[in-house]
Image (cartoon, helix red, strand yellow):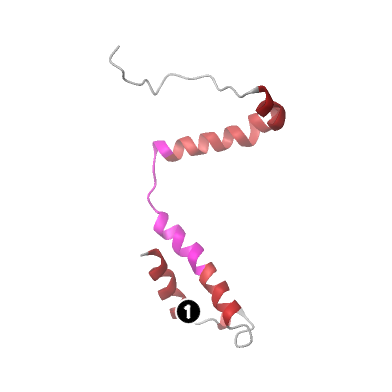
Amino acid sequence: MRGLLDSNRPVPFRLTPNLMELLTETGVNGPLSASVIASARCFMHPNFKVQTILRAILRDEMIMSYKKKHEPVCENLSEVPGEAIITKAVAAIY
């Protein structure tokens, strides 16, 4: 044996009795296994489009913070100046 890991060999999945009682059989076979599979896919096939996702999330955060600061000035989200939000979101990423 050379100390290499065999990534194709299935490994049994076991939980402690307390965790099994907390999650129940339905929780383990449903959401838990789906999230473990999704996480494994992310590690096996990484997709580095994080900046695009962060821009969308940060844009919403910047709009809400701008709206909170200027509450009497802007009553509607459509009144928030777009260029100001875009520049703040891009600056927050970099």
User: From which residue to which does the magenta span run?
Assistant: 43-59
How dense is the environment of label 1, judged by Cα within 10 Å: few (below 14), some, or many (20 and up)? Answer: few
Q: From what the image shows, is residue 9 above or below residue 32?
A: above
- Which residue is depicted at the point 53% across and 34% down? 36
- Viewport quadrant of the N terminus: top left
Q: Is residue 32 magenta?
A: no
Secondary structure of residue under mark 1: helix
The residue furthest left is 2
Image-quadrant location for residue 6: top left
Q: Is residue 46 magenta?
A: yes
Look at the magenta stretch and give its main secondary structure. helix
Q: From what the image shows, is residue 51 above or below residue 43?
A: below
The image position of residue 45, as x and y in percent, is: 39, 39
- Which residue is depicted at the point 61% across and 34% down? 32
Left or right position of 63 against 18: left
Image-quadrant location for residue 88: bottom left
* Residue identifier under label 1: 82
The image position of residue 70, as x and y in percent, is: 58, 83
Q: Name the residue nearer the viewer: 60 or 22.
A: 22
- Residue type, label 1: Gly
The residue furthest bottom is 73
The image position of residue 37, as x and y in percent, is: 52, 34
- Viewport quadrant of the C terminus: bottom left
Task: Report the number of numbered marks.
Answer: 1
- Which residue is depicted at the point 37% across and 50% down? 48
Left or right position of 52 against 1: right
Q: From what the image shows, is residue 92 above or below residue 41?
A: below
Left or right position of 11 against 64: left
- Which residue is depicted at the point 62% across and 81% down? 76
The image position of residue 52, as x and y in percent, is: 42, 60
